[in-house]
Amino acid sequence: MTAPAHPTALPASRPRRRWGRITHTGGRYGSSETQLVVYPPGSSGVDRFRADVEHASQPVVTGIGIVSVVVLLGLGVPAGPALLIPLALAAAVCIVLRMRTADIRRRSAVLLACRLELCPRPEDAALHSRAEELAERLGEAARACVDDPSRSDVYDRVWRDVFAEVRALDPHRDASGAHGGR
């Protein structure tokens, strides 16, 4: 059997739709927090990617910093420089990422739902559920668009609608859209 004259191209990977993120955190005594962040429609893919990287970078930079300190100390570097060098590099990386994502973070719609299970309130549970529903709606639209690129107009409409709803639910945003409490 001979090889084909023109090798078959691998299917191009489909781009991931970055609309934002939803995060869940739990605390002591039954407290929980859900944060839905929706990037502004029309923002560039590069800006959204940087915002994702900035969000994920904090624990990664911290871990790399700790490993770097241990390695430098193991190599015999004095404790002062072994602590300061990774700290300076981590600070520089975080500062650059924060500066490059300041605009998209400021324009993003944020829905923060907190609840305490010891004294549950129906409005807190409803806000948690609504954040979940909106994130699921965006996720479904993104998956459908990746599977069928001709549906990008549906994805864009869903993204705009969810962005507007999250912005309307944000109690810290004034009528002009400016954020007062972040």
Image (tube, rainbow, N blue to C red):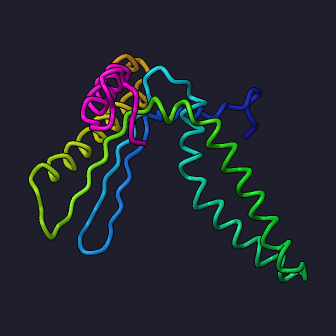
Q: Residue 138 placed where, x, y %?
A: 33, 34
Residue with the most extreme front position: 180
Is residue 14 among the parts visible in the rendering? no
Q: As rendered, which of 151 and 52 lies closer to the eye?
A: 52
Q: Quadrant of residue 114?
A: bottom left
For the image shown, how many numbered marks are present on the structure? 0
Q: Is residue 45 above or below residue 153?
A: below
Q: Is residue 160 magenta?
A: yes
Quadrant holding the N terminus: top right
Q: Residue 80 placed where, x, y %?
A: 83, 75
- Residue drawn 31% across the image and 36% down it: 140
Q: Is residue 136 above or below residue 128?
A: above
- Residue drawn 74% across the image and 51% down it: 92
Q: Residue 119 placed where, x, y %?
A: 12, 66
Q: As rendered, which of 96 and 2 lies closer to the eye?
A: 96
Q: Residue 62 placed where, x, y %?
A: 64, 64
Quadrant holding the C terminus: top left
- Residue drawn 35% across the image and 26% down it: 159
Q: Quadrant of residue 169?
A: top left
Q: Is residue 25 magenta?
A: no
Q: As rendered, which of 77 and 146 lies closer to the eye?
A: 77
Q: Quadrant of residue 96?
A: top right
* Bounds of the magenta segment: 155-182
Is residue 103 among the parts visible in the rendering? yes
- Residue drawn 37% across the image and 47% down it: 22
Residue with the most extreme left position: 122
